[in-house]
């Protein structure tokens, strides 16, 4: 059933947005090119970190590093809750928001129902990001427990090496979920442009894909950590 005030361009913009998000996620996380990403390269360093951790007499530095990672994830998770709350509050002031948007240059005329549906997409995107951040937070907690469980006698101890591999795998998994949460943030920002014009929404979704692809696969930082000129 067609929605009021939804034009063919609106439907095309929504389809393009979903195709960009899910298409890029498949490319970055499940295709054969995923091993070339910054996340994949950093996974090797995380494994090296966990094996170096085994041979440290004092592992306070390792727990501090995990604590710093937890603080970053917690910051984004709490910020996302505030953003979701703000958007839900704005749903109660839809008439005012519609009027403000109508006064913007090039903004398309929209009804309150259409505005609320667009806002709902933004809320759902932020909810997805929160779930990713919350799960990454829990995984980093698991990693800290594994570090605490690591034995001090590591020479000729295959169980210790296996535990380090498990800790590295949990650490990398947490980083991947955190990265997906950040990706959702980028696409949430693109969603804001839909309130103004669907054509701008299409351009914003494409721009987000360009930006995150460059940062994950072609950035200067990737060349540095991969030791490539």
Image: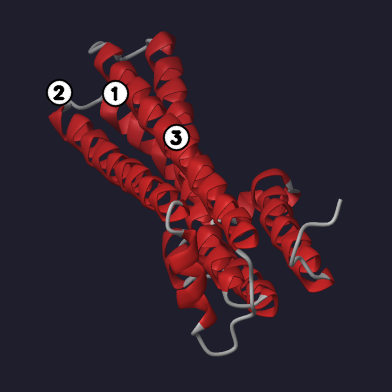
Q: Say the numbered circle drawn on residue 160.
A: none
Callout 1: few (<14), some (14-19), or many (20+) C-alpha neighbours within 10 Å?
many
Q: Position of residue 166 (x, y in %)?
A: 46, 21
Q: Circle 2 is placed at which residue position?
A: 57
Q: CA distance from mark 1 to mark 3?
A: 12 Å
Q: Which residue is mark 1?
A: 144
Residue, x 22% and y 35% (percent of image)? 67
Q: Is residue 61 above or below residue 3?
A: above
Q: Check disc 3 and report the residue beneath it.
A: 174
Rounded to the nearest angstrom, the CA distance separating label 3 from label 2 is: 26 Å
> How many badges with numbers are in the image?
3
- The spot of residue 117 in percent (x, y) is 63, 54
Q: Is residue 155 left or right of residue 229?
A: left
**Mark 3 closeness class: few <14, some 14–19, many ≥20 residues within 10 Å:** many
Locate residue 208: give its quadrant: bottom right
Q: Quadrant of residue 144?
A: top left
Q: Quadrant of residue 174?
A: top left
Judge from the rendering whether residue 204 lies leftward or rightward of residue 198; answer left or right.
left
Q: Position of residue 125 (x, y in %)?
A: 55, 49
Mark with earlier residue (3, 2): 2
Report the Cα–Cα distance between label 1 and label 2: 16 Å
Residue 63 visible at all: yes
In the picture, measured across the screen, residue 186 lies left or right of residue 36, that is: left
Farthest residue in the right direction?
1
Residue 20 or residue 198, whichever sits in front: 198
| Position of 105 relative to 23 (above/below) | below
């Amino acid at each position: 059933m067609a929605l009021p005030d939804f034009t063919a361009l609106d439907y095309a913009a929504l389809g393009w947005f979903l195709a960009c998000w899910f298409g890029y996620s498949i490319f970055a996380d499940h295709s054969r090119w995923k091993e070339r990403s910054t996340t994949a390269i950093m996974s090797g360093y995380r494994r090296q970190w966990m094996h170096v951790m085994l041979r440290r007499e004092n592992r306070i530095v390792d727990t501090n590093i995990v604590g710093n990672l937890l603080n970053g994830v917690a910051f984004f998770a709490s910020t996302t809750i505030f953003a979701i709350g703000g958007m839900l509050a704005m749903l109660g002031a839809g008439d005012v928001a519609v009027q403000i948007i109508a006064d913007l240059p090039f903004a398309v005329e929209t009804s309150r129902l259409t505005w609320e549906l667009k806002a709902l997409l933004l809320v759902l995107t932020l909810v997805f990001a929160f779930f990713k951040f919350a799960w990454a937070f829990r995984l980093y907690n698991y990693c800290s427990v594994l570090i605490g469980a690591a034995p001090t006698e590591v020479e000729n101890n295959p169980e210790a090496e296996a535990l380090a591999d498990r800790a590295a795998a949990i650490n990398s998994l947490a980083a991947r979920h955190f990265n997906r949460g950040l990706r959702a943030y980028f696409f949430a920002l693109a969603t804001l442009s839909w309130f103004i014009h669907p054509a701008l929404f299409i351009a914003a979704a494409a721009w987000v894909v360009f930006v995150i692809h460059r940062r994950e696969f072609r950035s200067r930082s990737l060349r540095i950590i991969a030791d490539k000129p």
